[in-house]
Image (cartoon, helix red, strand yellow):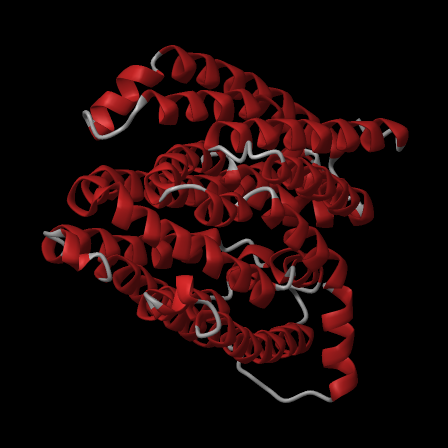
């Protein structure tokens, strides 16, 4: 028993280190290119690139269809059954490719139906390469198998390609189209390499299965998909909505603050990715509780430091390109992080893994309704400003946390 506990800790630590390296690269490398892109492209063109990414993010969510949660759980449970692994892998990939074609048709219809999109139609197609890369890359397979080093290696390679290309080939404002092109190329290369590793290292290839099996996997992931769509309403949708109701410059300032906020959240993602398959298989509440307390404490300390030195951080990164408006938005996001991190921890790494995904899902569905109502009021009253949208994010995330905490206590889990 003692040896098993030691092995569990060792495996978790190894996976955590791998994903931590990945997250540092995921957010450090873009943070290196972010100030450069803002300076070279200007807030106007940068906001176009950010707007396109926010729009395409809807299709990333559609093609993911919640499999990063549902398929990860299934792979973790059946990791010792090669035939079952082949079934899961093949059915999920078949569904994702079908969703990719559907997404491409929908995206094309939207782009050529509205002038706001059709003026820069090629930017949206270049950005859409992210969707293809995400479809190809089986992150859910590696996560379920607890082989996080593969995820790390492939994703860092993709990010390095993008980072080097940005500094070498983007030198003036007219090069703005190259940013989504390089970004998509990195995703696609990582996706192809990921499929190769699944075949080479695990001997899992694509097979055709009957429609009933495919339908069951599609149905099983539906509840996770609904929650992912709900989350997008108060994450990706903000930049998208601001793009319609404010100037490009204001969208750029909001997007920059949001990028830094997401980078902060991303630093904790390795913990949730490591814990989710482990808790789903082992149901070790005591271990989760200890890690949860440590993460919350570290998060509060980090937020206090960033809040105090946010002016210096922005000046260091962006010099005089950013106004106080962007810094104010970032500070609101920092306050939001106080509730976001524990909320994420007790959501999918815990409630869902312990067999209560409906509670984790309901919280984001209700949260999205709150956010949607709030944004609607801001639009109707003419107060749809970046700082007000950030405050709405704070209200929404706090609501999600309160609901999740209530359901955890109700089930006497923590």
Q: Give residue 102's position: percent from left, percent from top.
A: 57, 78
- Specify the farthest residue to the front: 381
Q: Give residue 284's position: percent from left, percent from top.
A: 73, 37
Compared with 396, 209 (above or below) is below
Q: Between residue 186 and residue 50, name the one nearer to us.
A: 50
Picture quarter containing residue 165?
bottom left
Compared with 2, 365 (above or below) is below
Q: Give residue 52's position: percent from left, percent from top.
A: 40, 57
Residue 306 vs residue 231: left or right?
left
Q: Quadrant of the C terminus?
A: top right
Q: Give residue 402's position: percent from left, percent from top.
A: 75, 26
Residue 326 vs residue 11: left or right?
left
What residue is shown at x 64% (from left), y 72% (from top)? 85
What residue is shown at x 40% (from left), y 42% (from top)? 23
Q: Between residue 269 and residue 402, name the one nearer to us.
A: 402
What residue is shown at x 31% (from left), y 62% (from top)? 186
Residue 3 vs residue 126: left or right?
right
Residue 300 vs residue 156: left or right?
right
């Amino acid at each position: 028993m003692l040896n098993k506990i030691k092995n569990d800790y060792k495996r978790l630590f190894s996976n955590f280190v791998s994903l931590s390296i990945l997250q540092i690269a995921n957010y450090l490398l873009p943070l290196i290119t972010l100030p450069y892109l803002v300076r070279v492209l200007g807030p106007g063109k940068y906001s176009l690139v950010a707007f396109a990414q926010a729009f395409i993010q809807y299709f990333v969510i559609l093609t993911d269809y919640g499999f990063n949660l549902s398929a990860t759980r299934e792979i973790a449970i059946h990791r010792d059954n090669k035939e079952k692994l082949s079934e899961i892998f093949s059915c999920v990939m078949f569904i994702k490719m079908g969703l990719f074609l559907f997404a491409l048709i929908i995206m094309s219809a939207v782009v050529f139906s509205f002038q706001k999109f059709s003026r820069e139609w090629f930017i949206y197609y270049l950005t859409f390469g992210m969707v293809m890369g995400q479809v190809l890359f089986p992150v859910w397979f590696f996560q379920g198998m607890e082989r996080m080093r593969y995820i790390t290696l492939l994703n860092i390679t993709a990010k390095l390609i993008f980072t080097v290309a940005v500094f070498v080939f983007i030198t003036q404002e007219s090069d703005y189209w190259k940013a989504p092109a390089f970004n998509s190329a990195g995703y696609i290369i990582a996706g192809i390499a990921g499929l190769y590793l699944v075949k080479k290292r695990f001997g899992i290839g694509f097979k055709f299965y009957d429609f009933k099996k495919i339908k069951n996997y599609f149905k099983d992931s539906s509840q996770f998909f609904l929650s992912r769509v709900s989350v997008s309403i108060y994450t990706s949708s903000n930049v998208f909505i601001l793009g319609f109701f404010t100037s490009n410059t204001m969208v750029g300032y909001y997007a920059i603050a949001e990028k830094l906020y997401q980078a902060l959240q991303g630093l904790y993602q390795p913990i949730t990715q490591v814990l989710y398959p482990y808790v789903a298989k082992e149901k070790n509440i005591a271990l989760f509780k200890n890690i949860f307390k440590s993460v919350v404490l570290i998060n509060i300390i980090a937020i206090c430091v960033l809040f105090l030195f946010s002016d210096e951080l922005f000046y260091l990164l962006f010099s005089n390109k950013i106004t106080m408006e962007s810094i104010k938005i970032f500070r609101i996001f920092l306050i939001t992080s106080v509730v976001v991190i524990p909320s994420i921890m007790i959501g999918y790494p815990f409630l869902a893994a312990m067999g209560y995904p409906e509670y984790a899902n309901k919280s984001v569905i209700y949260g999205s309704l709150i956010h949607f109502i709030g944004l609607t009021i801001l639009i109707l009253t003419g107060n749809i400003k970046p700082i007000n949208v950030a405050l709405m994010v704070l209200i929404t995330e706090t609501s999600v946390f309160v609901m999740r905490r209530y359901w955890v206590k109700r089930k006497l889990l923590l």
